[in-house]
Amino acid sequence: MEARAWPAIGRRMPESFWRSLWYFNLYRLASAIVFVGAVALYGGSINLGAESPRLFLAAAATYAVVAILFFGLAQFRRLPFDLLLTLEVVADIACLTVMMHFSGGMRSGMSYTLLVVLAGAGLVGQGRLALFFSALATVAILLEHADRVLRYGADPGEFVQAGITSIGFFATAITARLLARRVVANEELANRRGAALAAQLRVGERIIHDMQDGILVVEGDGRVRQFNPRAETLLEVKAPADPDLAAFSPDLAEKFFAWHERQTDERDLLRLPGSGRLIRVRFLPAGEGDIALVYLEDLAEAQTQAQQLKLAALGRLTANLAHEIRNPLSAISQAAELLRSEKRGEMQARLTRIIGDNTQRLNRLVSEVLELGRRDRAVQETIPLAQFLAAFLEEFAIRDDRVRSAVAASIDPDVVVCFDRSHLNRVLWNLVVNALRYCSGGAGSVRVEARLHPSARHCELHVIDDGPGIEPGRRGQVFEPFFTTHGAGTGLGLYIARELCEANGASLEVVDESVGAHFRLTARGEPCPESRSEGGAATAAAS
Protein backbone atom coordinates (compact mmCIF):
# COMPACT_ATOMS: atom_id res chain seq x y z
CA MET A 1 0.00 0.00 0.00
CA GLU A 2 1.08 3.55 -0.65
CA ALA A 3 1.80 5.75 2.31
CA ARG A 4 1.37 9.46 1.74
CA ALA A 5 1.12 12.32 4.22
CA TRP A 6 -1.92 14.53 4.13
CA PRO A 7 -1.15 17.91 2.56
CA ALA A 8 -1.55 21.09 4.56
CA ILE A 9 -4.98 22.64 4.76
CA GLY A 10 -3.74 25.78 3.02
CA ARG A 11 -2.18 23.91 0.12
CA ARG A 12 -3.58 25.10 -3.14
CA MET A 13 -4.26 22.38 -5.72
CA PRO A 14 -4.50 23.14 -9.45
CA GLU A 15 -7.96 23.99 -10.69
CA SER A 16 -7.95 20.95 -12.98
CA PHE A 17 -7.95 18.62 -9.90
CA TRP A 18 -11.06 20.24 -8.46
CA ARG A 19 -12.80 20.22 -11.82
CA SER A 20 -12.16 16.46 -12.17
CA LEU A 21 -13.46 15.92 -8.64
CA TRP A 22 -16.63 17.82 -9.56
CA TYR A 23 -17.33 15.38 -12.40
CA PHE A 24 -16.58 12.46 -10.07
CA ASN A 25 -19.15 13.81 -7.60
CA LEU A 26 -21.63 14.22 -10.43
CA TYR A 27 -21.19 10.55 -11.39
CA ARG A 28 -21.73 9.51 -7.73
CA LEU A 29 -24.92 11.53 -7.43
CA ALA A 30 -26.26 10.21 -10.75
CA SER A 31 -25.54 6.60 -9.69
CA ALA A 32 -27.33 7.06 -6.38
CA ILE A 33 -30.36 8.58 -8.11
CA VAL A 34 -30.46 5.68 -10.58
CA PHE A 35 -30.37 3.13 -7.78
CA VAL A 36 -33.13 4.91 -5.83
CA GLY A 37 -35.30 5.33 -8.93
CA ALA A 38 -34.83 1.74 -10.11
CA VAL A 39 -35.94 0.22 -6.77
CA ALA A 40 -38.78 2.73 -6.34
CA LEU A 41 -40.18 2.05 -9.83
CA TYR A 42 -39.54 -1.67 -10.37
CA GLY A 43 -39.43 -3.01 -6.82
CA GLY A 44 -38.46 -6.69 -6.60
CA SER A 45 -38.69 -7.36 -10.35
CA ILE A 46 -34.96 -6.59 -10.70
CA ASN A 47 -31.91 -7.92 -8.88
CA LEU A 48 -31.27 -4.62 -7.09
CA GLY A 49 -32.39 -5.05 -3.47
CA ALA A 50 -33.52 -8.62 -4.17
CA GLU A 51 -33.05 -9.76 -0.55
CA SER A 52 -34.27 -6.57 1.16
CA PRO A 53 -35.68 -3.82 -1.10
CA ARG A 54 -36.46 -1.57 1.84
CA LEU A 55 -32.95 -1.65 3.26
CA PHE A 56 -31.45 -1.30 -0.22
CA LEU A 57 -33.59 1.79 -0.80
CA ALA A 58 -32.43 3.24 2.52
CA ALA A 59 -28.77 2.57 1.61
CA ALA A 60 -29.26 4.15 -1.85
CA ALA A 61 -30.94 7.21 -0.32
CA THR A 62 -28.07 7.52 2.16
CA TYR A 63 -25.65 7.30 -0.77
CA ALA A 64 -27.50 10.16 -2.51
CA VAL A 65 -27.36 12.34 0.62
CA VAL A 66 -23.63 11.63 0.99
CA ALA A 67 -23.11 12.56 -2.67
CA ILE A 68 -24.86 15.90 -2.13
CA LEU A 69 -22.75 16.53 0.99
CA PHE A 70 -19.55 15.90 -0.95
CA PHE A 71 -20.73 18.34 -3.63
CA GLY A 72 -20.91 21.06 -0.99
CA LEU A 73 -17.52 20.21 0.52
CA ALA A 74 -15.89 20.26 -2.90
CA GLN A 75 -17.58 23.54 -3.77
CA PHE A 76 -16.34 25.39 -0.67
CA ARG A 77 -13.05 23.45 -0.48
CA ARG A 78 -12.93 23.29 3.28
CA LEU A 79 -10.87 20.10 3.26
CA PRO A 80 -7.57 19.20 1.57
CA PHE A 81 -8.04 17.59 -1.81
CA ASP A 82 -6.49 14.19 -0.95
CA LEU A 83 -8.43 13.92 2.32
CA LEU A 84 -11.72 14.78 0.61
CA LEU A 85 -11.07 12.28 -2.20
CA THR A 86 -10.27 9.54 0.33
CA LEU A 87 -13.46 10.21 2.29
CA GLU A 88 -15.49 10.07 -0.91
CA VAL A 89 -13.96 6.76 -2.08
CA VAL A 90 -14.38 5.19 1.38
CA ALA A 91 -18.05 6.28 1.35
CA ASP A 92 -18.43 4.83 -2.17
CA ILE A 93 -16.97 1.47 -1.13
CA ALA A 94 -19.06 1.30 2.05
CA CYS A 95 -22.38 2.27 0.43
CA LEU A 96 -21.92 0.10 -2.66
CA THR A 97 -20.85 -2.90 -0.55
CA VAL A 98 -23.95 -2.52 1.65
CA MET A 99 -26.21 -2.28 -1.43
CA MET A 100 -24.45 -5.32 -2.91
CA HIS A 101 -25.14 -7.25 0.34
CA PHE A 102 -28.88 -6.48 0.16
CA SER A 103 -28.93 -7.43 -3.52
CA GLY A 104 -27.58 -10.96 -3.07
CA GLY A 105 -23.82 -10.49 -2.79
CA MET A 106 -21.36 -11.25 -5.57
CA ARG A 107 -24.02 -12.82 -7.78
CA SER A 108 -25.85 -9.49 -8.12
CA GLY A 109 -23.02 -7.90 -10.18
CA MET A 110 -22.89 -4.83 -7.91
CA SER A 111 -19.20 -5.46 -7.35
CA TYR A 112 -18.46 -4.18 -10.84
CA THR A 113 -19.62 -0.71 -9.85
CA LEU A 114 -16.61 -0.63 -7.55
CA LEU A 115 -14.36 -1.00 -10.61
CA VAL A 116 -15.76 2.28 -11.98
CA VAL A 117 -15.18 3.99 -8.61
CA LEU A 118 -11.59 2.77 -8.40
CA ALA A 119 -10.84 3.79 -11.98
CA GLY A 120 -12.37 7.22 -11.41
CA ALA A 121 -10.49 7.72 -8.11
CA GLY A 122 -7.18 6.78 -9.77
CA LEU A 123 -7.71 9.26 -12.60
CA VAL A 124 -9.09 12.07 -10.45
CA GLY A 125 -6.32 11.70 -7.87
CA GLN A 126 -3.80 11.20 -10.69
CA GLY A 127 -2.56 7.91 -9.23
CA ARG A 128 -2.34 8.90 -5.58
CA LEU A 129 -3.63 6.24 -3.08
CA ALA A 130 -4.93 4.10 -5.95
CA LEU A 131 -3.60 0.83 -4.49
CA PHE A 132 -4.91 1.75 -1.05
CA PHE A 133 -8.41 2.16 -2.47
CA SER A 134 -8.12 -1.21 -4.26
CA ALA A 135 -7.08 -2.94 -1.05
CA LEU A 136 -9.93 -1.33 0.82
CA ALA A 137 -12.46 -2.50 -1.81
CA THR A 138 -10.96 -6.02 -1.70
CA VAL A 139 -11.30 -6.20 2.09
CA ALA A 140 -14.89 -4.95 1.83
CA ILE A 141 -16.12 -7.62 -0.62
CA LEU A 142 -14.23 -10.40 1.18
CA LEU A 143 -15.79 -9.40 4.51
CA GLU A 144 -19.20 -9.17 2.89
CA HIS A 145 -18.92 -12.69 1.42
CA ALA A 146 -17.48 -14.08 4.65
CA ASP A 147 -20.48 -12.71 6.55
CA ARG A 148 -22.77 -14.28 3.96
CA VAL A 149 -21.03 -17.69 4.34
CA LEU A 150 -21.11 -17.58 8.13
CA ARG A 151 -24.64 -16.28 8.56
CA TYR A 152 -26.52 -17.60 5.56
CA GLY A 153 -24.45 -20.63 4.57
CA ALA A 154 -23.46 -19.30 1.17
CA ASP A 155 -21.18 -21.35 -1.06
CA PRO A 156 -17.51 -20.89 0.05
CA GLY A 157 -16.50 -21.54 -3.54
CA GLU A 158 -17.70 -18.08 -4.38
CA PHE A 159 -14.54 -16.77 -2.66
CA VAL A 160 -12.83 -17.60 -5.96
CA GLN A 161 -15.11 -15.14 -7.72
CA ALA A 162 -14.40 -12.58 -5.00
CA GLY A 163 -10.66 -13.14 -5.47
CA ILE A 164 -10.92 -12.69 -9.25
CA THR A 165 -12.89 -9.52 -8.70
CA SER A 166 -10.20 -8.31 -6.27
CA ILE A 167 -7.55 -8.96 -8.89
CA GLY A 168 -9.64 -6.82 -11.22
CA PHE A 169 -9.64 -4.08 -8.58
CA PHE A 170 -5.84 -3.99 -8.42
CA ALA A 171 -5.50 -4.24 -12.21
CA THR A 172 -7.88 -1.32 -12.59
CA ALA A 173 -5.98 0.70 -9.97
CA ILE A 174 -2.59 0.01 -11.59
CA THR A 175 -3.94 0.87 -15.04
CA ALA A 176 -5.50 4.07 -13.72
CA ARG A 177 -2.23 4.95 -12.01
CA LEU A 178 -0.22 4.48 -15.23
CA LEU A 179 -2.78 6.48 -17.20
CA ALA A 180 -2.71 9.19 -14.55
CA ARG A 181 1.07 9.42 -14.77
CA ARG A 182 0.83 9.81 -18.52
CA VAL A 183 -1.86 12.45 -18.07
CA VAL A 184 0.30 14.31 -15.56
CA ALA A 185 3.33 14.18 -17.87
CA ASN A 186 1.27 15.37 -20.82
CA GLU A 187 -0.27 18.14 -18.75
CA GLU A 188 3.14 19.35 -17.54
CA LEU A 189 4.46 19.26 -21.11
CA ALA A 190 1.41 21.17 -22.33
CA ASN A 191 1.84 23.74 -19.56
CA ARG A 192 5.53 24.24 -20.37
CA ARG A 193 4.83 24.58 -24.07
CA GLY A 194 1.90 26.86 -23.37
CA ALA A 195 4.07 29.08 -21.15
CA ALA A 196 6.83 29.15 -23.77
CA LEU A 197 4.31 29.96 -26.50
CA ALA A 198 2.71 32.70 -24.37
CA ALA A 199 6.16 34.20 -23.66
CA GLN A 200 7.01 34.05 -27.35
CA LEU A 201 3.73 35.73 -28.23
CA ARG A 202 4.37 38.48 -25.67
CA VAL A 203 7.85 39.06 -27.05
CA GLY A 204 6.48 39.14 -30.61
CA GLU A 205 3.73 41.56 -29.65
CA ARG A 206 6.26 43.78 -27.86
CA ILE A 207 8.59 43.79 -30.85
CA ILE A 208 5.75 44.63 -33.20
CA HIS A 209 4.49 47.36 -30.85
CA ASP A 210 7.91 49.05 -30.58
CA MET A 211 8.99 48.75 -34.21
CA GLN A 212 9.91 52.02 -35.88
CA ASP A 213 8.18 50.84 -39.05
CA GLY A 214 4.45 50.22 -39.22
CA ILE A 215 3.36 46.60 -39.49
CA LEU A 216 -0.01 44.96 -40.10
CA VAL A 217 -0.83 41.25 -39.95
CA VAL A 218 -3.52 40.76 -42.59
CA GLU A 219 -5.63 37.73 -43.50
CA GLY A 220 -6.43 36.85 -47.09
CA ASP A 221 -9.86 38.48 -46.96
CA GLY A 222 -8.32 41.80 -45.88
CA ARG A 223 -9.17 41.57 -42.19
CA VAL A 224 -6.40 42.98 -40.00
CA ARG A 225 -5.52 40.57 -37.23
CA GLN A 226 -2.82 42.68 -35.57
CA PHE A 227 -1.13 46.07 -36.02
CA ASN A 228 1.13 48.41 -34.09
CA PRO A 229 0.56 52.09 -33.17
CA ARG A 230 3.20 53.15 -35.70
CA ALA A 231 0.97 51.88 -38.52
CA GLU A 232 -1.84 54.17 -37.36
CA THR A 233 0.59 57.09 -37.16
CA LEU A 234 2.01 56.54 -40.64
CA LEU A 235 -1.40 56.05 -42.26
CA GLU A 236 -2.88 58.95 -40.23
CA VAL A 237 -5.94 57.00 -39.06
CA LYS A 238 -7.48 55.73 -35.85
CA ALA A 239 -8.36 52.09 -36.46
CA PRO A 240 -11.78 50.86 -35.27
CA ALA A 241 -12.33 47.61 -33.39
CA ASP A 242 -11.80 44.53 -35.58
CA PRO A 243 -10.71 46.59 -38.61
CA ASP A 244 -10.13 45.55 -42.19
CA LEU A 245 -7.36 46.91 -44.38
CA ALA A 246 -9.70 49.34 -46.14
CA ALA A 247 -10.31 51.04 -42.78
CA PHE A 248 -6.63 51.97 -42.74
CA SER A 249 -6.35 52.92 -46.41
CA PRO A 250 -8.53 51.98 -49.41
CA ASP A 251 -5.52 52.38 -51.72
CA LEU A 252 -3.47 50.08 -49.51
CA ALA A 253 -6.26 47.47 -49.54
CA GLU A 254 -6.40 47.64 -53.34
CA LYS A 255 -2.64 47.10 -53.59
CA PHE A 256 -2.84 44.23 -51.10
CA PHE A 257 -5.50 42.32 -53.02
CA ALA A 258 -3.58 42.85 -56.25
CA TRP A 259 -0.46 41.47 -54.57
CA HIS A 260 -2.36 38.60 -52.93
CA GLU A 261 -2.98 37.02 -56.32
CA ARG A 262 0.77 36.79 -56.94
CA GLN A 263 2.01 35.98 -53.37
CA THR A 264 5.57 37.23 -53.80
CA ASP A 265 7.85 39.46 -51.77
CA GLU A 266 6.97 42.81 -53.32
CA ARG A 267 7.52 46.51 -52.59
CA ASP A 268 5.30 49.39 -53.61
CA LEU A 269 4.78 53.09 -52.88
CA LEU A 270 1.68 54.63 -51.31
CA ARG A 271 0.94 58.35 -51.24
CA LEU A 272 -1.52 59.47 -48.59
CA PRO A 273 -4.31 61.60 -50.07
CA GLY A 274 -4.43 64.14 -47.22
CA SER A 275 -0.86 65.06 -46.33
CA GLY A 276 0.79 63.73 -49.48
CA ARG A 277 3.22 61.70 -47.35
CA LEU A 278 4.97 58.97 -49.32
CA ILE A 279 4.97 55.53 -47.68
CA ARG A 280 7.00 52.56 -48.84
CA VAL A 281 4.90 49.39 -48.58
CA ARG A 282 6.26 45.85 -48.50
CA PHE A 283 4.01 42.79 -48.77
CA LEU A 284 5.40 39.51 -47.47
CA PRO A 285 3.77 36.08 -46.96
CA ALA A 286 3.81 35.03 -43.30
CA GLY A 287 4.50 31.36 -44.02
CA GLU A 288 1.81 28.72 -44.02
CA GLY A 289 -1.80 29.82 -44.10
CA ASP A 290 -3.52 32.72 -45.75
CA ILE A 291 -1.81 35.41 -43.67
CA ALA A 292 0.49 38.19 -44.89
CA LEU A 293 2.67 40.87 -43.34
CA VAL A 294 2.45 44.47 -44.54
CA TYR A 295 5.44 46.67 -43.62
CA LEU A 296 5.12 50.47 -43.80
CA GLU A 297 8.12 52.79 -43.92
CA ASP A 298 8.07 56.59 -44.00
CA LEU A 299 10.28 57.62 -46.92
CA ALA A 300 10.63 61.13 -45.50
CA GLU A 301 12.28 59.74 -42.34
CA ALA A 302 14.51 57.45 -44.40
CA GLN A 303 15.60 60.39 -46.52
CA THR A 304 16.19 62.47 -43.37
CA GLN A 305 18.39 59.75 -41.87
CA ALA A 306 20.36 59.51 -45.12
CA GLN A 307 20.76 63.28 -45.10
CA GLN A 308 22.00 63.20 -41.51
CA LEU A 309 24.60 60.59 -42.42
CA LYS A 310 25.75 62.75 -45.32
CA LEU A 311 25.92 65.83 -43.07
CA ALA A 312 27.89 63.91 -40.45
CA ALA A 313 30.40 62.78 -43.07
CA LEU A 314 30.55 66.29 -44.51
CA GLY A 315 31.09 67.70 -41.02
CA ARG A 316 34.07 65.43 -40.41
CA LEU A 317 35.50 66.37 -43.79
CA THR A 318 34.97 70.09 -43.10
CA ALA A 319 36.66 69.83 -39.70
CA ASN A 320 39.67 68.15 -41.26
CA LEU A 321 39.86 70.79 -44.00
CA ALA A 322 39.57 73.59 -41.43
CA HIS A 323 42.44 72.09 -39.47
CA GLU A 324 44.59 71.93 -42.60
CA ILE A 325 43.69 75.48 -43.64
CA ARG A 326 44.87 76.90 -40.33
CA ASN A 327 48.58 76.35 -41.01
CA PRO A 328 48.80 78.27 -44.31
CA LEU A 329 46.45 80.89 -42.85
CA SER A 330 48.87 81.49 -40.01
CA ALA A 331 51.72 81.84 -42.51
CA ILE A 332 49.74 84.44 -44.51
CA SER A 333 48.94 86.38 -41.33
CA GLN A 334 52.59 86.42 -40.25
CA ALA A 335 53.71 87.52 -43.71
CA ALA A 336 51.21 90.39 -43.58
CA GLU A 337 52.57 91.47 -40.20
CA LEU A 338 56.09 91.49 -41.61
CA LEU A 339 55.00 93.61 -44.59
CA ARG A 340 53.24 96.00 -42.24
CA SER A 341 56.43 96.48 -40.21
CA GLU A 342 58.39 97.64 -43.29
CA LYS A 343 56.18 100.77 -43.70
CA ARG A 344 57.07 101.39 -47.36
CA GLY A 345 53.98 103.42 -48.18
CA GLU A 346 50.31 104.15 -47.58
CA MET A 347 49.20 101.72 -50.31
CA GLN A 348 51.18 98.85 -48.81
CA ALA A 349 49.79 99.62 -45.33
CA ARG A 350 46.22 99.54 -46.68
CA LEU A 351 46.83 96.26 -48.53
CA THR A 352 48.43 94.60 -45.50
CA ARG A 353 45.49 95.80 -43.37
CA ILE A 354 43.06 94.17 -45.83
CA ILE A 355 45.08 90.94 -45.69
CA GLY A 356 45.13 91.02 -41.88
CA ASP A 357 41.37 91.64 -41.55
CA ASN A 358 40.51 88.82 -43.92
CA THR A 359 42.93 86.38 -42.32
CA GLN A 360 41.38 87.16 -38.93
CA ARG A 361 37.93 86.56 -40.38
CA LEU A 362 39.06 83.29 -41.94
CA ASN A 363 40.71 82.26 -38.68
CA ARG A 364 37.49 83.00 -36.79
CA LEU A 365 35.55 80.93 -39.33
CA VAL A 366 37.99 78.02 -38.99
CA SER A 367 37.80 78.20 -35.19
CA GLU A 368 34.01 78.01 -35.28
CA VAL A 369 34.07 75.05 -37.66
CA LEU A 370 36.49 73.23 -35.36
CA GLU A 371 34.30 74.07 -32.38
CA LEU A 372 31.34 72.54 -34.19
CA GLY A 373 33.32 69.35 -34.71
CA ARG A 374 33.73 69.03 -30.91
CA ARG A 375 30.00 69.26 -30.15
CA ASP A 376 29.70 65.56 -29.25
CA ARG A 377 32.37 65.78 -26.52
CA ALA A 378 29.95 67.13 -23.94
CA VAL A 379 30.93 66.57 -20.29
CA GLN A 380 27.89 67.68 -18.35
CA GLU A 381 28.02 69.00 -14.80
CA THR A 382 25.69 70.79 -12.42
CA ILE A 383 26.25 74.54 -12.91
CA PRO A 384 24.75 77.21 -10.58
CA LEU A 385 23.63 79.77 -13.15
CA ALA A 386 24.00 82.85 -10.93
CA GLN A 387 27.68 82.17 -10.20
CA PHE A 388 28.40 81.09 -13.76
CA LEU A 389 26.80 84.20 -15.29
CA ALA A 390 28.65 86.56 -12.92
CA ALA A 391 31.99 85.03 -13.94
CA PHE A 392 30.97 85.02 -17.60
CA LEU A 393 30.01 88.73 -17.66
CA GLU A 394 33.19 89.66 -15.80
CA GLU A 395 35.26 87.86 -18.41
CA PHE A 396 33.21 89.31 -21.27
CA ALA A 397 33.76 92.84 -19.92
CA ILE A 398 37.49 92.41 -20.50
CA ARG A 399 36.77 92.07 -24.22
CA ASP A 400 33.86 94.54 -24.44
CA ASP A 401 33.35 97.14 -21.70
CA ARG A 402 29.76 97.81 -22.87
CA VAL A 403 28.66 94.71 -20.96
CA ARG A 404 28.92 96.48 -17.59
CA SER A 405 26.21 99.00 -18.49
CA ALA A 406 24.19 97.37 -21.26
CA VAL A 407 23.63 93.87 -19.82
CA ALA A 408 21.21 93.39 -16.92
CA ALA A 409 21.08 89.92 -15.33
CA SER A 410 18.15 88.54 -13.32
CA ILE A 411 18.78 85.00 -12.11
CA ASP A 412 17.57 83.19 -8.99
CA PRO A 413 20.61 82.01 -6.97
CA ASP A 414 19.02 78.54 -6.57
CA VAL A 415 18.66 77.86 -10.32
CA VAL A 416 21.05 75.19 -11.64
CA VAL A 417 21.49 73.68 -15.07
CA CYS A 418 22.96 70.36 -16.25
CA PHE A 419 25.27 71.39 -19.09
CA ASP A 420 28.82 71.22 -20.40
CA ARG A 421 30.54 74.29 -18.96
CA SER A 422 32.54 75.19 -22.07
CA HIS A 423 29.50 74.63 -24.30
CA LEU A 424 27.29 76.86 -22.15
CA ASN A 425 29.99 79.52 -22.19
CA ARG A 426 30.14 79.42 -25.99
CA VAL A 427 26.36 79.51 -26.37
CA LEU A 428 26.04 82.54 -24.08
CA TRP A 429 28.98 84.23 -25.77
CA ASN A 430 27.33 83.96 -29.18
CA LEU A 431 23.93 85.12 -27.89
CA VAL A 432 25.32 88.11 -25.96
CA VAL A 433 27.58 89.15 -28.87
CA ASN A 434 24.56 89.03 -31.14
CA ALA A 435 22.43 91.03 -28.67
CA LEU A 436 25.11 93.73 -28.17
CA ARG A 437 25.50 94.06 -31.94
CA TYR A 438 21.85 95.04 -32.47
CA CYS A 439 20.77 96.61 -29.14
CA SER A 440 20.42 100.36 -28.52
CA GLY A 441 23.43 100.36 -26.17
CA GLY A 442 21.58 101.97 -23.29
CA ALA A 443 21.46 100.72 -19.72
CA GLY A 444 19.68 97.38 -19.53
CA SER A 445 19.24 97.15 -23.30
CA VAL A 446 20.25 93.46 -23.06
CA ARG A 447 18.54 91.29 -20.44
CA VAL A 448 19.67 87.83 -19.34
CA GLU A 449 17.04 86.03 -17.25
CA ALA A 450 16.73 82.52 -15.86
CA ARG A 451 13.39 80.98 -14.88
CA LEU A 452 12.37 77.62 -13.52
CA HIS A 453 9.96 75.72 -15.74
CA PRO A 454 6.63 74.81 -14.05
CA SER A 455 7.65 71.13 -14.23
CA ALA A 456 10.65 71.99 -11.96
CA ARG A 457 12.76 69.62 -14.08
CA HIS A 458 13.77 72.22 -16.67
CA CYS A 459 14.95 75.79 -16.57
CA GLU A 460 14.73 78.51 -19.22
CA LEU A 461 17.55 80.98 -19.94
CA HIS A 462 16.41 84.06 -21.87
CA VAL A 463 18.62 86.55 -23.75
CA ILE A 464 16.58 89.60 -24.84
CA ASP A 465 17.65 92.85 -26.53
CA ASP A 466 15.78 96.04 -27.44
CA GLY A 467 17.04 96.19 -31.03
CA PRO A 468 15.00 96.06 -34.24
CA GLY A 469 14.40 92.34 -33.79
CA ILE A 470 14.28 89.62 -36.43
CA GLU A 471 12.10 89.99 -39.47
CA PRO A 472 9.26 87.41 -39.48
CA GLY A 473 10.38 86.04 -42.83
CA ARG A 474 13.91 85.36 -41.52
CA ARG A 475 13.11 83.74 -38.19
CA GLY A 476 13.26 80.31 -39.76
CA GLN A 477 16.72 81.02 -41.21
CA VAL A 478 18.64 82.39 -38.22
CA PHE A 479 19.88 78.93 -37.20
CA GLU A 480 20.97 77.92 -40.68
CA PRO A 481 24.74 77.72 -41.26
CA PHE A 482 26.39 80.71 -42.96
CA PHE A 483 23.24 82.84 -42.72
CA THR A 484 24.12 86.33 -41.48
CA THR A 485 22.92 89.93 -41.85
CA HIS A 486 26.18 91.42 -40.54
CA GLY A 487 29.01 92.15 -42.96
CA ALA A 488 31.73 90.93 -40.57
CA GLY A 489 29.84 87.86 -39.34
CA THR A 490 30.53 84.26 -40.33
CA GLY A 491 26.94 83.05 -40.12
CA LEU A 492 27.90 80.15 -37.84
CA GLY A 493 27.37 81.65 -34.38
CA LEU A 494 23.70 80.80 -33.84
CA TYR A 495 24.02 77.55 -35.77
CA ILE A 496 26.85 76.41 -33.46
CA ALA A 497 24.91 77.61 -30.40
CA ARG A 498 21.91 75.44 -31.30
CA GLU A 499 24.10 72.43 -32.13
CA LEU A 500 25.86 72.70 -28.75
CA CYS A 501 22.49 72.92 -27.00
CA GLU A 502 21.27 69.78 -28.74
CA ALA A 503 24.50 68.00 -27.74
CA ASN A 504 23.55 68.69 -24.10
CA GLY A 505 19.92 67.64 -24.48
CA ALA A 506 18.74 71.26 -24.53
CA SER A 507 16.96 73.40 -27.11
CA LEU A 508 17.47 76.93 -28.43
CA GLU A 509 14.69 78.80 -30.17
CA VAL A 510 13.53 82.26 -31.18
CA VAL A 511 10.54 83.66 -29.26
CA ASP A 512 8.17 85.84 -31.25
CA GLU A 513 7.98 89.30 -29.70
CA SER A 514 7.04 92.67 -31.09
CA VAL A 515 10.20 94.48 -29.90
CA GLY A 516 13.78 93.23 -30.08
CA ALA A 517 15.19 89.72 -30.47
CA HIS A 518 14.37 87.10 -27.84
CA PHE A 519 16.23 83.77 -27.62
CA ARG A 520 15.18 81.05 -25.17
CA LEU A 521 17.45 78.20 -24.06
CA THR A 522 15.59 75.32 -22.35
CA ALA A 523 17.78 72.82 -20.49
CA ARG A 524 17.67 70.32 -17.65
CA GLY A 525 17.15 72.32 -14.47
CA GLU A 526 18.22 69.75 -11.89
CA PRO A 527 21.54 68.26 -10.76
CA CYS A 528 23.21 65.90 -13.20
CA PRO A 529 23.43 62.22 -12.19
CA GLU A 530 26.70 61.65 -10.32
CA SER A 531 27.58 65.31 -10.87
CA ARG A 532 31.10 66.36 -9.96
CA SER A 533 31.91 69.41 -7.86
CA GLU A 534 30.87 72.72 -9.33
CA GLY A 535 32.72 75.94 -9.16
CA GLY A 536 35.40 77.87 -10.92
CA ALA A 537 35.19 80.67 -13.41
CA ALA A 538 33.75 80.32 -16.83
CA THR A 539 35.99 78.80 -19.47
CA ALA A 540 37.60 81.30 -21.79
CA ALA A 541 35.55 81.84 -24.90
CA ALA A 542 36.79 80.72 -28.29
CA SER A 543 38.09 83.50 -30.39
Image (tube, rainbow, N blue to C red):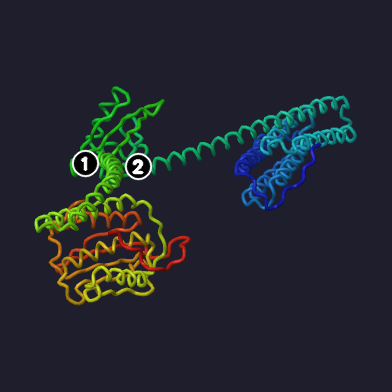
User: Which comes before the other along the chain, label 2 or label 1?
Assistant: 2
- Residue plotted at (80% across, 25% down): 164
Q: Position of residue 392 (x, y in %)?
A: 32, 69
Tag 2 residue: 212
Instruction: Give the residue type that dot 1 points to.
Output: Arg
Tag 1 residue: 277
Q: Quadrant of the N terminus?
A: top right
Question: Which quarter of the figure has residue 501?
Answer: bottom left
Element on which disc 1 rests: loop
Q: Is residue 450 left or right of residue 135?
A: left
Q: Is residue 351 left or right of residue 209?
A: left
Q: Is residue 467 left or right of residue 7?
A: left
Query: In the orientation shown, which residue stands out farthest toward the left?
Result: 347
Question: Which quarter of the figure has residue 33?
Answer: top right
Element on which disc 2 rests: loop
- Residue plotted at (32% across, 70% down): 389
- Residue plotted at (34% across, 29% down): 284
Q: Position of residue 203 (x, y in %)?
A: 46, 40
> Does the image show residue 143?
yes
Answer few, some or many: residues within 10 Å of disc 2's Cα (few below 14, many 20 plus, some between 14 and 19).
Answer: some
Residue 442 marker: none
> Does the image show residue 239?
no
Q: Position of residue 345 (x, y in %)?
A: 10, 57
